[in-house]
């Protein structure tokens, strides 16, 4: 299976190409500015360097949030455009599910899992799952202090790029964060009949605003 995967939702840029079931390209960078200009040429070069075209893909997959509003919009619009032009399915995977499924492929936790994602603001995006991967809560946006006050959350293992702040409150933390290779591998496991469950539509936990983000390193 040939799959082109990219994540721009999580304040970084991650790309992977699976060719005939094997990862042949991977790149991850902390840069996430200017994606609206660079994304399509980047994808075209990745395919060309590996002797593929958009028409030669079986699937495209990207993350649909929550996270960077700009990254989400650029990634989904690009995936939709390529899908329409090349007549290939484009999948949108919510970031909570992506982090969770990637973690469960490598580890077998014995307690609930709280996926926490960075927002670059005072709040974290989060969703609680059982150890087996079933959703317990709906997605939320809360401050670390408010998260710490929830008795159900205190029993969970915190994972994701927003997990670190919870150490201060005595939570068990594993800052595991998947990359585009995990996204391609996950997309390859989705049966054809279930593709419709992964629409290229944004997942927003809160409304976009114009407030200042935290200082970036």
Image (cartoon, grey):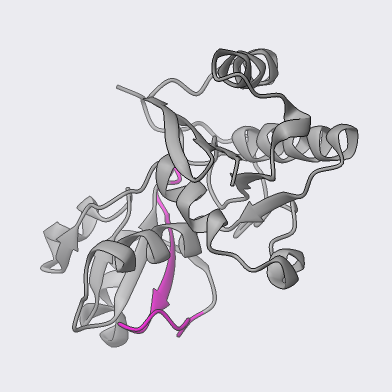
Look at 49% across and 64% down and name the residue there: 97
Q: Residue 195 colored magenta? A: no
Regarding residue 78, the answer to whether it shows in the image is: no
Is the C terminus in the top left, top right, bottom left or bottom right quadrant?
A: top left
Residue 71 occupies quadrant: top right
Question: Magenta residues: mostly which secondary structure?
Answer: loop
Question: Residue 126's spot in the image, x, y percent?
Answer: 43, 64
**Residue at the limit of the structure toward the front, as seen here:** 20
Regarding residue 206, the answer to whether it shows in the image is: yes
Picture layout, residue 159 above or below residue 43:
below
User: For this view, does 7 lie left or right of residue 198?
Assistant: left
Picture layout, residue 10 above or below residue 39:
below
User: For this view, does 76 lie left or right of residue 133?
Assistant: right
Question: Residue 104's spot in the image, x, y percent?
Answer: 32, 68
Question: Residue 199's spot in the image, x, y percent?
Answer: 74, 58
Read off the magenta span: 119-137
User: For this view, does 175 lie left or right of residue 195?
Assistant: left
Which sits in the foreground, 176 or 137?
Answer: 176
Which sits in the foreground, 214 or 104?
Answer: 104
User: For this view, does 44 lie left or right of residue 77?
Assistant: left
Question: Residue 63's spot in the image, x, y percent?
Answer: 58, 48
Look at 71% across and 38% down and name the residue there: 73
Residue 29 occupies quadrant: top left
State the count of labels.
0
Residue 100 occupies quadrant: bottom left
Picture layout, residue 92 above or below residue 36:
below
Look at 41% across and 65% down and name the residue there: 101
Q: Residue 127 colored magenta? A: yes
Look at 21% across and 60% down and name the residue there: 166
């Amino acid at each position: 299976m040939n799959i082109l995967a990219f994540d721009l939702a999580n304040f970084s840029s991650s790309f992977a190409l699976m060719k005939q079931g094997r990862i042949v390209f991977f790149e991850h960078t902390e840069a996430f500015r200017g994606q609206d200009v660079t994304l399509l040429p980047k994808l075209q070069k990745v395919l060309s360097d590996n002797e593929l075209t958009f028409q030669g893909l079986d699937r495209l997959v990207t993350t649909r949030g929550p996270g960077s509003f700009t990254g989400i919009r650029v990634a989904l619009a690009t995936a939709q455009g390529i899908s329409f032009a090349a007549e290939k399915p484009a999948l949108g995977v919510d970031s909570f599910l992506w982090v969770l499924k990637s973690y469960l492929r490598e580890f077998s936790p014995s307690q609930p899992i709280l996926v926490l994602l960075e927002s670059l603001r005072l709040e974290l995006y989060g969703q609680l799952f059982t150890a087996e991967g079933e959703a317990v809560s709906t997605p939320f946006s809360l401050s670390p202090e408010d998260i710490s006050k929830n008795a159900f959350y205190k029993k969970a293992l915190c994972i994701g790029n927003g997990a670190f702040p919870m150490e201060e409150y005595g939570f068990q933390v594993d800052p595991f964060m998947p990359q585009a290779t995990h996204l391609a591998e996950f997309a390859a496991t989705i049966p054809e009949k279930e593709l419709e469950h992964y629409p290229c539509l944004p997942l927003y936990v809160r409304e976009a605003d114009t407030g200042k983000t935290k200082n970036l390193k």
